[in-house]
Image: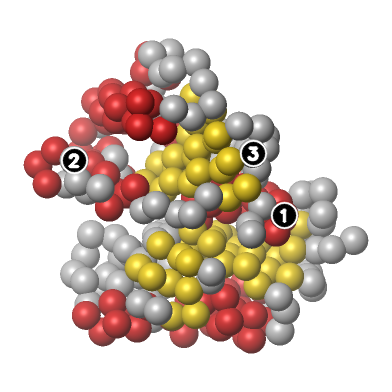
Amino acid sequence: MTTTLAIDCGGGGIKASVLDESGTLRAHPTRAVTPYPLPPALLVSTIVQLAEQMPAAERVTVGMPGMIRHGIVVQTPHYICKAGPRTKVLPKLVAAWEGFDMREAVSTALDMPALVLNDAEVHGCGLVTGRGLEMVITLGTGLGNAIFDNGRLAPHAELSRGITRWGLTYDEYLGEHERIRLGDAQWSRRARIVIESWVPVYLWDRLYLGGGNSRRITKSQQEKLPENVILANNSAGIIGGVRAWDMVD
């Protein structure tokens, strides 16, 4: 039975676990604080350190923020900053990350096949039914997104970089900083209005809301969401590490 090392890289923490083919945990997830500043080599070494605390696995799935194409980083938002999200962007880190072959680096470091995707895409792999057009939005440090067509992962569009009110990106407008500033009630209303604005754009069959902050949407705003919007379990970011291998072309 194939075992998968699943790594979920976030702006504030990096989680790891090992699962079997059915998605059953072989080890309790372990977590490390995301170190900053974070050049590619440091992220790879952090993943290796977490892997050493886990049972042996036969392959690895890594989910990380940003635009990832075929395992290569086109752009990543948080890891180019001096001390994490919303801090000073360092040009040296921008240059280091752009075009970095994360899949090859992880595969070489761990000596096993690797799959590297956007973190919301991995999250979505743990959620979707495989029927119809399914969209995933994750709410956490920022905003993540993924689209699946009959269970196949569609090419990534970095919705978080779109511009909304006051020149803020969706990453900023719905991110953790704004949630803290506004409070859950006002932030939840904002999130619900944005989600409703995307309905005519995507016309999804189902939208899954995941990420750590999805649970902070107030009950009154949850009740106003369209019926085909589903609040998801945040553990999908780990479980999706197994299913992703069957959903990516």
Query: Given the image, on which type of amino acid does mark 3 rest?
Result: Asn
Graded by Cα atoms within 10 Å as few (under 14), some (14 to 19) or many (20 or more), the crowding at tag 2 reads some
Picture residue at 9% right of the left edge, 42% below the top: 166
Q: Residue 51 sits in which quadrant?
A: bottom right
Q: Is residue 168 found left or right of 213 in the rendered image?
A: left
Helix, strand or loop at mark 2: loop
- Measured as percent of width and height from the top left, residue 187 is found at 27, 30
- Measured as percent of width and height from the top left, residue 181 is found at 20, 39
Rendered-image quadrant of the C terminus: bottom right
Judge depth for marks 3 and 2 and give the one in front: 3
Q: Residue 114 sits in which quadrant?
A: bottom right
Is the residue under label 2 in contact with that under label 1 (CB below 8 Å)?
Answer: no
Residue 56 shows which numbered tag?
none
Picture residue at 35% right of the left edge, 68% below the top: 75
Q: Is residue 62 visible?
A: yes
- Cα–Cα span, label 3 and label 2: 30 Å
Q: Is residue 224 found left or right of 22 in the rendered image?
A: left
- Measured as percent of width and height from the top left, residue 227 is found at 50, 16
Judge depth for marks 1 and 2 and give the one in front: 1
The residue indicated by pointer 3 is 150
Query: Given the image, on which type of amino acid does mark 1 rest?
Result: Asp
- Measured as percent of width and height from the top left, residue 129 is found at 67, 34
The residue indicated by pointer 2 is 164
Residue 246 shows which numbered tag?
1
- Cα–Cα span, label 3 and label 1: 12 Å
Helix, strand or loop at mark 1: helix
Q: Is residue 211 found left or right of 235 in the rendered image?
A: left
Judge depth for marks 3 and 1 and give the one in front: 3
